[in-house]
Image (cartoon, helix red, strand yellow):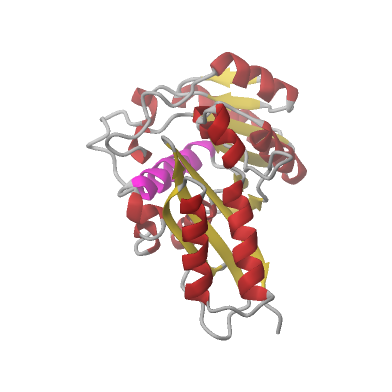
Amino acid sequence: MITVETVVSLREQIARLRQSDKRIAFVPTLGNLHAGHMRLMQEARHHAQAVVASIYVNPLQFGQNEDFDSYPRTPSHDKVALLSAGVDLLFRPAESEMYPHGRAAQTVVEVPGLSDELCGAFRPGHFRGVTTVVNRLFNLVTPDVAVFGKKDYQQWLLVRLMTADLGLPVEIIGVDTVREPDGLALSSRNNYLSPDERKVAPHLYEALGTLRDRFRDKGLALETVEENAIMELEADGFRPDYVSVRRQQDLQKPGPDDRQLVALAAAWLGQTRLIDNVEFELKS
């Protein structure tokens, strides 16, 4: 695996891959890699002859009083993990490479509307930071395919929308959430959980499954099942930001004819913010 840290070196390596007529798949990450990231690398390999990964903790997607400074950074572990996954090229830039004129002067990219809903309503500017850095990375790496986990369903959909709106020639692949045996979605932020909180954390996924069953199988009103899920999470010690059922294709609120749905939730457990989602289909 070749590791590069500058835009100039990255472009040189991408040019070599293109000269070899290799199809390129790209997986952007914040590092602190776990089995969920490895699943993304595996999927990338299915779609291309060369896999490029990036590790960059992007300050633009962290708000005030969020965990940018304390976000876990494990470069040695990450490099070993990427080597074992057969990644061909790692881009590990400094901030000066990503934003050479500084954060405040960086041209931003934002998907209107959806960026301010759900997680966007509770983390103002977060998704603007995500789409800005992903757009810049796409222009630097020029991949044919990019792979994202669907644990952050809203992020995955926003990247798809941005890519389509800007006419970028990148196919966006979504990969289902990788979970612990007890159902907890893998996340770097799980490291923040205390032992007692870790025992409770899987209840978020359980609550979404219960919501799905009540709405899909028992025909309870949407507002009722959302409210019940919030109350049950609160009883378990969570502080929910939201629980909401939306259409899969655009995360708008479902109408009577919509069948492909997703239940999404974000909730705090102690000092840790967890997100999760469950896709489901209504019977005709």
**Looking at the image, can residue 22 be seen?**
no
**Residue 7 falls in which quadrant of the image?**
top left
Percent position of residue 198, x then y = 58, 34
Q: What's the magenta bit mostly, secondary-structure-wise? A: helix
Near-viewer residue (260 or 92): 260
Q: Is residue 185 above or below residue 271?
A: below
Q: Which residues are magenta?
A: 126-141
Q: Is residue 132 above or below residue 271?
A: below
Q: Is residue 212 left or right of 222 when viewed as pictured? A: right
In magenta segment, residue 148: no
**Looking at the image, can residue 192 be seen?**
yes
**Residue 186 falls in which quadrant of the image?**
top right
Percent position of residue 116, x then y = 34, 58
Q: Residue at x 52, y 48 (%)?
A: 236
In magenta segment, residue 131: yes
- Outermost top residue: 76
- Outermost right residue: 46
Near-viewer residue (171 or 274): 274
Q: Quadrant of the C terminus?
A: bottom right
Q: Is residue 90 left or right of 283 when viewed as pictured? A: left
Q: Is residue 192 above or below residue 233?
A: above
Near-viewer residue (149 or 25): 149
Total numbered badges shown on the rendered structure = 0
Q: Residue at x 26, y 30 (%)?
A: 101
- Outermost front residue: 235
Q: Residue at x 58, y 41 (%)?
A: 200
Percent position of residue 163, x then y = 49, 56
Q: Quadrant of the N terminus?
A: top right
Near-viewer residue (107 or 178): 178
Percent position of residue 96, x then y = 34, 24
